[in-house]
Image: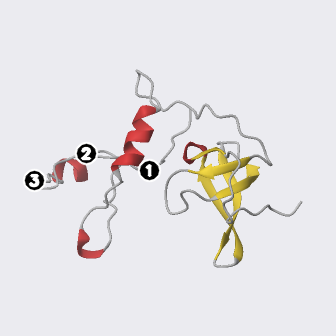
């Protein structure tokens, strides 16, 4: 078993009354991720809920059930590229998908977790491009 987010711990707390000392003192915590004076970064609730929905009763994240193959058309379902449709160029051993997106008129390689993609149905979406063979 390999960690999904090596070196990170996710903590849920009341933003109105944060208690950071126990988090800072937790074994292995070297710093808290944040941006400038905005304080610690938040993970959108939908992403956390999606990860928790994939956990078994033992709390271990189950692999994505979808079996993708190189060349499959997929629709990205979450994040800044949500609703883009593209084809899979490569799949890593850890099941991360390499796709090619048309961003600002330029083909751009993007790597995403398979949990954030579904098999695409026929769609008129013009963002679809294919990686060169």
Give neighbour class at mark 1: few <14, some 14-19, many 20+ (Cα, 10 Å): few
Percent position (x, y) of residue 94?
65, 42
Evaluate if marks 1 and 2 touch, with contact meaning CB atoms under 8 Å apart: no
N-terminal of the two: label 3 or label 1? 1
Q: Splitting the image into 4 quarters, where does residue 56 fall? A: top left
Q: In the image shown, does 85 or 14 lie closer to the viewer?
A: 85
Distance from Cα at disc 3 to Cα at disc 2: 12 Å
- Disc 1 is placed on an element classified as loop
**Quadrant of residue 41 in the image?**
bottom left
Nearest the eye: 13 or 127 = 127
**Residue matched to label 3:** 17
Q: Is residue 41 above or below residue 26?
A: below
Tell me: residue 47, above or below residue 82.
Answer: above
Relative horizontal placement of residue 28, taking residue 100 as reference (left or right): left
Q: Residue at x 16, y 49 (%)?
A: 14
**Pointer 1 residue:** 7
């Amino acid at each position: 078993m390999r960690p999904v987010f090596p070196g990170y711990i996710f903590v849920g707390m009341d933003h109105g009354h944060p208690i950071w000392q126990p988090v800072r003192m937790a074994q292995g915590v070297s710093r808290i991720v944040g941006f400038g004076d905005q304080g610690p970064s938040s993970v959108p609730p939908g992403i956390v809920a999606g990860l928790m929905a994939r956990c078994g009763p033992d709390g271990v994240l189950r692999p994505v059930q979808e079996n993708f193959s190189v060349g499959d058309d997929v629709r990205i379902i979450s994040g800044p590229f949500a609703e883009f449709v593209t084809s899979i160029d490569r799949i890593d051993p850890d099941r991360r998908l390499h796709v090619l997106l048309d961003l600002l008129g330029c083909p751009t390689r993007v790597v995403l977790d398979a949990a954030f993609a579904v098999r695409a149905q026929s769609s008129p979406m013009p963002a679809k491009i294919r990686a060169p063979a």
